[in-house]
Structures are given as structure tokens and as C-alpha cells.
Image (cartoon, rainbow, N blue to C red):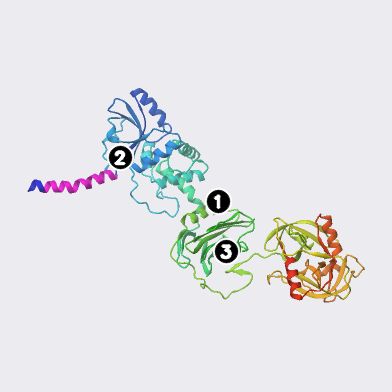
Amino acid sequence: MTRYFLLMVLMILLPATTALSQQKQVVWVQVEAQPSLARAQESIRRYATALQDVNGFSLSSGWYAIALGPYTTEDAEQVLRVYRSEGIIPRDSYIAFSSSYRQQFWPIGANFLNRTPLNTPDIQTAQTPEPEPETLAAEPLTEPADETPSQARQGERLLSREDRADLQIALKWAGFYDGAIDAAFGRGTRSSMARWQEANNFEGTGILTTKQRAELMRQYNAVLEGLGLQMVSDAAAGISIKMPLDIVAFQKYDPPFAHYTATGDVDASVLLISQEGDSDTLTGLYDIMQTLEIVPETGPRTLKQNAFTLIGESALTISHTEVWLQNGQIKGFSLVWPAGDEERRTRLLGEMQQSFARIDGVLDANAGNHEEQSIDLVSGLEIRRPIFSRSGFFVDQAGTVVTTVEVVESCRRITIEDGHEAEVAASNNGLGIAVLRPLENLAPLTIAAFQQVIPRLKSDIAVAGYSYGGVLGAPTLTFGQLSDVRGLNGEKSLKRLALAALDGDVGGPVIDAGGAVLGMLLPASQSGRKLPEGVSFAADADAVQQVLTQAGISISKTSEQKQIPPEVLTHKAAGMTVLVRCWE
């Protein structure tokens, strides 16, 4: 009975013991074997100059093996894969077990084979979870005693794969490493470690001690000091992300944004973006955000079906926006940071990108305080405004536009229609006429047909223009009469109008009752005199045609005189009239 009981105990304990032994199984990466000890020692010295963890063992066959280790199975597979791909070890290298080896002859005095898997301090398993660090620093802040290269090698074996990758990242940031972040300490990584050691007054062994690793990571993370980088879980927005809480603080919800604004001297801000929607909603958000003052006009930007990236760069500000559509929810963030602080901005951005995570919830469209309402604001953010806006009109099917010379004299950038960039093709300061060519072909609904018959005095005319700078979203018609076919001083290139126009109408087409173009409306200061209210001037059709002909632009002409219904006239005028905006 007693014998049966002991047998049962062994049957229960044996699987558990076997599983525990396998949990910390010692393995090696065998790179080659030599038929003699002399040749093996010669080869092993060559490997030891470039690789860590080089060992030599005798084999039962009488040959001598050269192996890297000891490792856990997971780490051995990683070392084998990386070193093979880099050509550091032969392609036929393989994973071997301690049972394959007899006596150890290298390093001299070492005896790894007699250390049990459960007691050895040289093996780091991948099964113990590491806590998620706030930054890449994983080393203690206490000042460690320095180590010998042999002790440093043993310390390296305790590093996780993430720790090794972080060291490569830090070496790359410091300018000493340009290889792949693969967490394998090959020849390139060892050389970069040695160069970093020498630059920091350490012996260039190529093996970082615990103290040196702590110093390297301290240097790497020093740029983030003072930002107060912490994880923030915004339940209302449904977003978790690292934020510089010593620099910004929550201000308000104004859907689709959660605003985190500057609290100190650094003019920075963060937006969390959260709303329900589809790909059309995403595209609309992409378009709207490009009009915001916080997003400078220049910089790379990419729109995909389920994501967009929007980078704006100016002399004062750099903004970076990333947004993703997933499961009917649009979420993302914007980081707005002062220009000239690129290293800190880049590091902070990387921390935010890496930590960004979706959590349950999406920002309620009715959240926040909506008392402040303005056409100049979008969700609490000021939109970019032009210096001024004027009107113009299409004169050919390629989208060429005639407008006032004002936009040529004072504008760094010119847009027509819905933000299409345009360049100056021709201008005549004396006549007050400029010709703009879009940087991409447009497709006008209507193009101007220039009237070749001199109109009768007192005949009805109208000017089409964006009287209020585009606020109304469409051009309007202002009606009047033709007062004279010359200017006040008899100028043949001018027509005097009895018409109360606004500044936004300037550059717009002056048309007759049939929609034919009689000329282009000029600014009120054209004559240099203070004129009675309701007196305006236009550059006549011949003057506009002259500028266009000199620019090599063919135009449409008409001699037909007719009167069309007001609604048809309005539609025809709206099809040719263009909003022209002047930007800094």
C-alpha cells in the first residue's frame, strides 16, 4: 500500500517538475564545430572580438563546438534570426541543448554546464511581465557601482527584449548607431556602444555596464524633463494618451475637440479629437481642420479612407494631427508646439503616438459650453482669415480669372474659389487689371462673353461679386445704370456707373441685362477723388480684352443684345464669378 502511494505522488509531481524545468530550459546557438582544440580556440577568439556570450565545448564525437549563450529558447530564436540575417553567424547555425556538450574550454574557468537551469542567474526568461514604463528609462535612479566587462555581460542577460531595443534607440538618438532596432547586440550595436563609451570618458569595451546604461538612458530622457509626461485617460473623449501636464491642462470640451491649453511659458496645446462618423465625416473634418489658425498652411498632409495625417509648419508653430476612423468612431489628437524646439517636440510626439489608445466612449456632440458662437470659430478654435477678399470672373475653360490688381500688390499667396492656389499670369497697374492662372485646371460653370457693342447710356447694368467677403457663400448681384462710357477726365478705358458697390465686389464682372460682360469693377479710390455715394467705375471690356490678349489668352465675344429674366441672369453671373482671397 505504501509503495502504491509513493508511486502516485511521483506521478503527480513529475509532470510539474518537468514543466518547471522546461520553463527555464537552457539552450545555445551553435555557430560551428572544429576537429581540433587548436583550430577551435583560433576560431573562438575571432568570434569573441565581435560577439557576446561566446562559449566553447567539447563534443562526444571528439570535435569542439563554438556556441553563443546560454539563452532561453525565445531569446535564442531571436539571436539566431537576427545574427543570421546580418551575416554575423553562418546560415547553418542552429539551437542546441546542454546535453549535446561535455566539458567547457572557453571562457577559461567557466562551467555553465554544471549550473542547474533553475538556479543560474545568467538566464532571463521572457515569462516575467515587465511593468509599462512612462518613458524609455527602465534603469534605477540610484548610482550603481561600475562593473567589469564580464559582470556587464551577465547584467545584459537580465535585460528584456524591450530593454535592449530601448538601448539601441538611445544610441541612435545620440548619433552613434544607424542600424535596425532589432534588440540584438551584433557587431554594429557593439561598435556604437564602444564609440558612446569613449565619447563619455568610459573605456570602449563595447559592453555597457549597469551604470553606463543608466547614464545613456538619462541622457536620452533628459529632453523630456520638465514636461510632466503622464498618462491621461479622458473618459468623455474615449482616449488614453500621454500628455505633458506641466505644460498643458484641460480647458473645455467643444465637440469634436477636447481642448488642453498652455499653462506656462511654452506656447503649446493638445487637442483630443473624438466624434461618431464615417469616411465622409472624416473627409469633412480633414477639410475643416486645414482652415484652422492652429494648422499652418504649409506642410505634408495625407488623407486615406480611414485616416488622415495633417502637419502644418510655419516660422512660429508646428502642428501635427493624426486621426483614425474605426468602428464608426473618429478619434485622434493634435499637438501644437513652438517652432525651433524640434528635438523636444519630436520626442514628445513619439511618446504620444506610442501611447495613444482608444477606450470606451466618444465625445457627446452636445458636450461643453456653446454660448460663444462666431463664424470665425470652429468648435472653439479660430479659423484662418485672409487679409482681404475680392471678386473676379472666369474668362476661359482652363479657369483663368480676371480680377483687381490689388491682389497682386499686397498678397504673398492668392486663392480662388474654394481655396485653389493661383499665380499671377499678367497685370496692368495703369488699368488696374490682373490675370490669375490656377495651379490646377478648374472647370468653370460659365465663362465671360465680352460685349462688343457699345451700350446705351442709362441702360441697366449689374455687378456680380462677393460683397461680404464670402460670408454668404455665393456671389450677389448689385443693380444700377450706366452713367457714362468714359471716366471723369474722358478716359476711354473707363465706364462710370450709378451703382452702390462694396469693397468685396471689386474685381467682379459688370454685366448688361443679357449677361454679357461690359467690364470689371474697380476700387472706389480709382479716380483719386472723394466721389458721391453711388458712383463707381469699371475698366471697360476693351481694356480687359487688351490685357488678356497680351497674356496670350483667347476670350469669348458677343454682339448680342437682349434681356433675360433676373433669375437666369443671377444664375449666369454666379457661374462665372469667383471669390479671390489674399493671404499673408
Q: What residue type is labelled 3?
A: Leu
Residue 488 shown left or right of residue 120 in the figure: right
Is 14 in the magenta?
Answer: yes
Decide if residue 530 is in sight here: no
229 sits left or right of 65 in the view: right
Q: Nearer the viewer, mark 2 or mark 3?
A: 3
Rendered position, 500 above or below 264: below
The CA distance from mark 3 to mark 1 is: 29 Å
* Residues drawn in magenta: 5-23
Nearer to us of marks 3 and 1 is 3
Q: Mark 2 sits on what residue?
A: 26
Tell me if label 2 and label 3 are in contact, CB under 8 Å: no
Mark 2 crowdedness (10 Å alpha carbons): few <14, some 14-19, many ≥20 = many
The one nearer the camera, 495 or 22, is 495
Q: Which residue in the protein does label 1 denote? A: 343
Residue 576, located in which quarter of the rendered image? bottom right
Residue 567, compared with residue 167, is above or below; it is below
Which kind of residue does numbered mark 1 sit on? Glu
Residue 480 on image: x %, y %? 82, 76
**The residue positioned farthest toward the left in the image shown:** 1
Q: Between disc 2 and disc 3, whose residue precedes?
A: 2
Is residue 358 in sight in this rendering? yes
Q: In this view, does 344 lie to the left or right of 446?
A: left
Whether residues under marks 2 and 1 lie with C-beta atoms below 8 angstroms apart, the answer is no
Q: Quadrant of the C terminus?
A: bottom right
Identify the residue position indicated by label 3 in the image.
Answer: 285
Between tags 2 and 1, which lies in front?
2
Q: Is residue 412 above or below residue 531?
A: above
Crowd rating for badge 3 (residues with CA inside 10 Å; few <14, some 14–19, many 20+): some
Look at the numbered disc 2 and give the secondary structure of its residue: loop
Residue found 47% across the figure and 68% down from its top:
236
